Image (cartoon, rainbow, N blue to C red):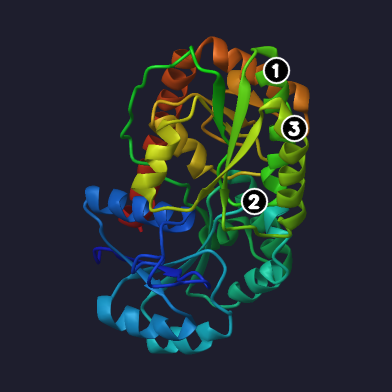
Amino acid sequence: MTKPVILFILKRREDFNLEQHNAKGMSTGLYNSASFMSDMCVANGIDARLEVAIDNNCIDRLVTLHKPTHVIIEALWVVPSKFTILTKLHPNVKWIIRLHSEMPFLAGEGMALDWIGDYALYPNIVIAANGPRMLNEVRSYLKIKQDWSDEEAKKRIIYLPNYYPQLYKKKKYLVNKEYIDIGCFGAVRPLKNHLLQAIASLQFAEKIGKKLNFHINVGRVESKGEPVMSNLIGLFTQLHEKGHRLISNVWTPREEFLQLCEKMDIGLQVSFSETFNIVGADIISQGVPLVGSTEIPWFEKMYSARAPHCEEIYRALLLTHQEPERNVEINQRKLTEYTSKTDQIWSSYFKGE
């Protein structure tokens, strides 16, 4: 059996600027995720490389350079018709299109289901989901479209979950502060639920007698997130005299972002749809307690909340404030358990083919 050589290919961000971004296109969640997967494969004795392409036309050159057995295209960005050329140029390569979203988020990408249906026409293309629900939903769709048997669907649509490095910190919690710093990081999108989390955070801060510093990232407002940002600004403008503040943090390379996470008292990631939530993992990795969505697959339910329910977020914040060390201990352990299974799943697929 030929030893696998995996080439991960991402698309460089559209707003790339050499003065602001690194050569790989700046540390985005997708790039970090792919780099974690590549490092995990190498640690398991699987040859893996990672490249960032400017567009579809770079793929042939990168595949010719690295001579992989498998190419993993991270997310939906390669137009399906491109594979008519690529599969002829590289007939022995297995192409894996790896999806990073659940169906509710994918619904906002107008071409998604059309492209996935076209990918299924190529016998050398496999679709990979990073969540079990998405796996089942795509299998159901393509079984109907292609008249596939259950066995064929399992071969053509596979499960490749996310990995996260198990490097964790502990920290001391400062209680004698005028402000409480809550980090609700990530791109501002409707399904990320920033506004309701801000309201719950305000209720929580008032309850414990502190002013709120509500931290967000600015610079990536996506998927019709502009009204969300406007409402966040309006909310805290109205409450400025009460001492509550919206703190806007620019996007930075990962190491700087982790340093920002470490400064928070609590992290918030109560979104409507998640397959993994790398921002939540970053927060927990720095020893900062987290209130997360019930959608996050590795997260402890005791400290979670359902996204539409402000009262659940508020109560989870109170519980986390009372026992921050326990929150961190449990969630670091559960994240380790999840990523250890990921390690096994990837090794089984690529070494067992």
Residue under the point 26% across and 75% down:
66
Looking at the figure, which quarter contains the C terminus? bottom left
Q: How crowded is mark 2: few (under 14 residues within 10 Å), some or many (20 or more)?
A: many
Residue mark closest to the camera, 2 vs 3: 3
- Alpha carbon separation for disc pair 2 and 3: 21 Å
- The three-letter code of the residue at mark 3 reads Leu
View extreme (front): residue: 241
First in sequence: mark 3 or mark 1? 1
**Mark linked to residue 188:** 2
Q: Is residue 310 above or below residue 109?
A: above
**Mark linked to residue 143:** none
How far across and how far down the image is residue 29, in percent? 47, 53
Q: Residues within 10 Å of mark 3 (few under 14, many from 20)?
A: few
How far across and how far down the image is residue 45, in percent? 21, 52
First in sequence: mark 2 or mark 1? 2
- Alpha carbon separation for disc pair 2 and 1: 25 Å
Q: Do the residues labelled 2 and 1 touch (CB within 8 Å)?
A: no
Residue mark closest to the camera, 3 vs 1: 3
* Residue 237 visible (yes or no): yes
* Residue 307 visible (yes or no): no
The residue carrying mark 1 is: 206
Residue under the point 41% across and 75% down:
53
The residue carrying mark 3 is: 239
Q: In this view, does 59 lie above or below 208?
A: below
Residue under the point 62% across and 56% down:
150
- Whether residue 200 sits left or right of residue 30 in the image: it is right
